[in-house]
Image (cartoon, rainbow, N blue to C red):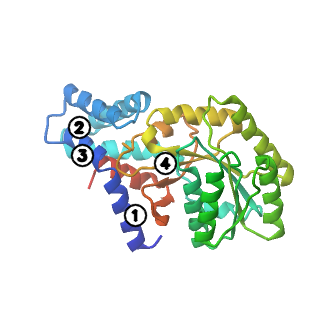
Amino acid sequence: MSAPQKTSWLGRLRSTLTRTREQIAAVFSGKQIDENWYEELETALIAADVGMAATSALIERVRSDARKAGARDVEAVREILLANLTTLLQPCERRSWIERLDADKPFVVMIAGVNGAGKTTTIGKLAHWLADHGKTVLLAAGDTFRAAAREQLAVWGERNGVEVISHTGSDPAAVVFDAVSAARARDRDVLLADTAGRLPTQTHLMEELKRIKRAIAKSHEGAPHEVLLVVDGTNGQNALAQVRAFDAAVGVTGLIVTKLDGTAKGGIIAALASERAGNPIPIFFIGVGESLDDLQPFVAADFARALVGAA
């Protein structure tokens, strides 16, 4: 990303997190650093959807580091919070993902998520991002339960100049199986496979998701190379339950967090980073708006600074 593009993206990111940043910034308003102040910071972080576990860990580290540094100024403590939040988020960062796409062609990405998370729109934006990075893409309309999903994917395919493999009323596993063969025959770099939106409690649909994954594995050795889960950033702590359920079912290898567009509090990113301590699920992309360029790779330091509001 060029410098002007990066500045524009950071500006949009900061804008979407304004409400949360202002709530946290209010804690850093010239007050004395004491136990009451730490309780206020704890409350602000929990209100931002950071979650109890991640908040408790952050508060403990900030308090310890501030004590060791002899920090009594609120701005000094803010920088300590920023450093600790960045450290928490960094294991989720995957900047080198694009380099893996050449390892096995076609590189098959299976994309899952609940209804309403923005899954199909995200696939369209991801296809655009991949094309910008010189990759040829094929889309598989594996959501055969909703005709609207196939139509929506077709619109995104036309918008991006990308072909969509779609069979009306067909078994989703068969559609994706055929799409892998088509991607190989047409020498495409990446296949993005859509799947039907489902709730983790819909056991029969989760079993269908497992069957799609098995079909992909049969059609191309080593595939799917990634299983990405699209998570709605406005869902707060409910997103954690979704991640756990889908991970247990199909082994989620990465997350895309959408709808960080002003209504989401943003702290859910920190909560996700605290899952599977020491080995969190990577956050590949975050989305902050409706335009094609509003889906960008997750960068821990940028997100932490936008959330905390440090200069």
Q: Give the class, few, some or many, for how many residues have Cα within 10 Å of label 4's Cα (few <14, many ≥20).
A: some
Q: Are marks 1 and 4 in contact (CB under 8 Å)?
A: no
Q: Which mark is residue 22?
A: 3
Residue 221, given in percent of the width and then of the height, sits at: 84, 53
Q: Which residue is mark 4?
A: 90
Tell me the residue that label 1 is attached to. 9
Category of crowding for the residue at label 2, using alpha-carbon neighbours closer than 10 angstroms: few (below 14), some (14–19), many (at least 20) = few
Residue 279 occupies which quadrant of the picture? top right
Q: Position of residue 181 (x, y in %)?
A: 84, 61
Q: Nearer the viewer, mark 1 or mark 4?
A: 1
Question: Of the residues under marks 3 and 4, which one precedes in the sequence?
Answer: 3
In primary-sequence order, the first of circles 3 and 2 is: 3
Q: From the viewer's perspective, tell me whether residue 155 is left or right of residue 59.
A: right
As measured in the structure, the alpha-carbon distance from the residue carrying label 1 to the one carrying label 4 is: 19 Å
Looking at the rendered structure, the secondary structure element under dot 3 is: helix
Left or right: 89 in relation to 183: left
Of labels 2 and 4, earlier in sequence is: 2
Q: Amino acid at mark 2?
A: Gly
How far apart marks 2 and 4 lie (CA) works out to 26 Å
Q: Disc 3 or disc 4, which is closer to the eye?
A: 3
Residue 70: numbered disc? 2
- Which of 143 and 253 lies nearest the eye of the viewer? 143
Q: Kindly state the secondary structure of the residue where label 4 is placed.
A: helix
The image shows residue 158, relative to residue 86, as above or below, that is below
Q: Earlier in the sequence, mark 3 or mark 1?
A: 1
Q: What's the residue type where badge 4 is placed?
A: Gln
Looking at marks 1 and 4 on the same chain, the residue that comes earlier in the sequence is marked by: 1
Evaluate whether residue 276 shows in this view. no
Q: Residue at x 38, y 28 (%)?
A: 56
Q: Amino acid at mark 3?
A: Glu
Which circle, 3 or 2, is nearer the viewer?
Answer: 3
